[in-house]
Image (tube, grey):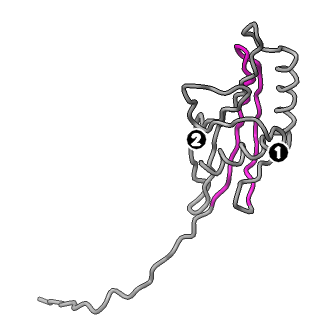
C-alpha cells in the first residue's frame, strides 16, 4: 500500500513539484496549496490457487490556496480539477521501485467544499508460487496382523 501512495504522490510531483503532499494523515497545521492522499479501501480476491487481484480505492484531495478574504479561487480550482484529471487519464499507474504498473479502472473527480477530490480505483495482479514439498517422511513400520 505504501508503494501505491508513493506512486500517486510521485505522479503528482511530476506536474506540481512545489506542492506539499500529505500521505494518510493531515497535520494540525495544514499548508496550502497541498495534496492529501489516503487509502479509502482495499481488498484481495483469489482468481485461482496462485493468482490474486489486489483492489484499492485511493482518495486524492487538493487543498486550494486561500486568498485574503478567506475564500478559494474557483477558476483556479476548476483548472486544478482538469489538471489532476489529465494526470491520471492513462489506464495505468507505474509503481515506484518496481517494473510493474497498477491498472486504473475508475476515476471520479469533483469540487466539494472548496476542495478538489479525486477517487482512484485500481488493481494489481499478484501471483504466489506454490511450493510443493515432496520430502520423504522417513521410515515407518507397518505391522500387519491376520487372524
Percent coordinates x, y for residue 89 in the rendering? 85, 39
Badge 1, how many Cα within 10 Å: few under 14, some, many 20+?
A: few
Quarter of the figure with the C terminus: bottom left
Distance between mark 1 and mark 2 Cα atoms: 26 Å
Which quadrant of the structure image shows residue 136?
A: bottom left
State the residue at coordinates (82%, 20%). 77
Q: Is residue 34 magenta?
A: no
97 vs 17, left or right, is: left
Residue at the image point whose x is 60% and y is 55% from the top: 52
Q: Quadrant of residue 33?
A: top right
Which span of residues is magenta-colored? Answer: 100-126
Let me know if residue 112 is in the magenta part: yes
Mark number displayed over residue 14: 1
Q: From what the image shows, is residue 138 above or below residue 51?
A: below
Q: Neighbour class for label 2 at 10 Å: few (<14), some, many (≥20)? A: some
SS class, disc 1? helix
Judging depth in this view, the residue of 14 and 98 nearest the camera is: 14
Q: Secondary structure at mark 2?
A: strand
Q: Which of labels 1 and 2 is toward the front? A: 1
Q: Which residue is mark 2?
A: 42
Q: Main secondary structure of the magenta part?
A: strand
Between 33 and 3, the one nearer to me in the picture? 33
Amino acid at each position: 500500500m505504501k508503494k501505491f501512495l508513493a506512486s500517486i504522490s510521485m505522479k503528482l510531483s511530476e506536474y506540481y513539484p512545489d506542492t506539499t503532499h500529505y500521505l494518510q494523515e493531515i497535520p494540525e497545521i495544514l499548508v496550502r496549496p497541498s495534496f492529501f492522499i489516503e487509502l479509502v479501501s482495499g481488498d484481495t480476491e483469489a482468481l485461482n490457487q496462485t493468482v490474486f487481484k489486489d483492489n484499492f480505492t485511493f482518495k486524492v484531495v487538493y487543498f486550494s490556496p486561500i486568498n485574503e478574504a478567506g475564500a478559494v479561487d474557483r477558476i483556479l480550482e476548476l483548472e486544478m480539477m482538469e489538471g489532476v484529471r489529465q494526470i491520471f487519464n492513462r489506464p495505468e499507474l507505474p509503481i515506484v521501485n518496481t517494473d510493474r504498473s497498477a491498472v486504473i479502472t475508475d476515476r471520479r473527480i469533483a469540487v466539494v467544499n472548496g476542495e478538489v477530490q479525486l477517487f482512484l480505483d485500481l488493481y494489481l495482479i499478484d501471483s504466489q508460487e506454490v511450493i510443493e514439498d515432496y520430502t520423504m517422511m522417513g521410515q515407518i513400520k507397518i505391522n500387519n496382523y491376520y487372524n
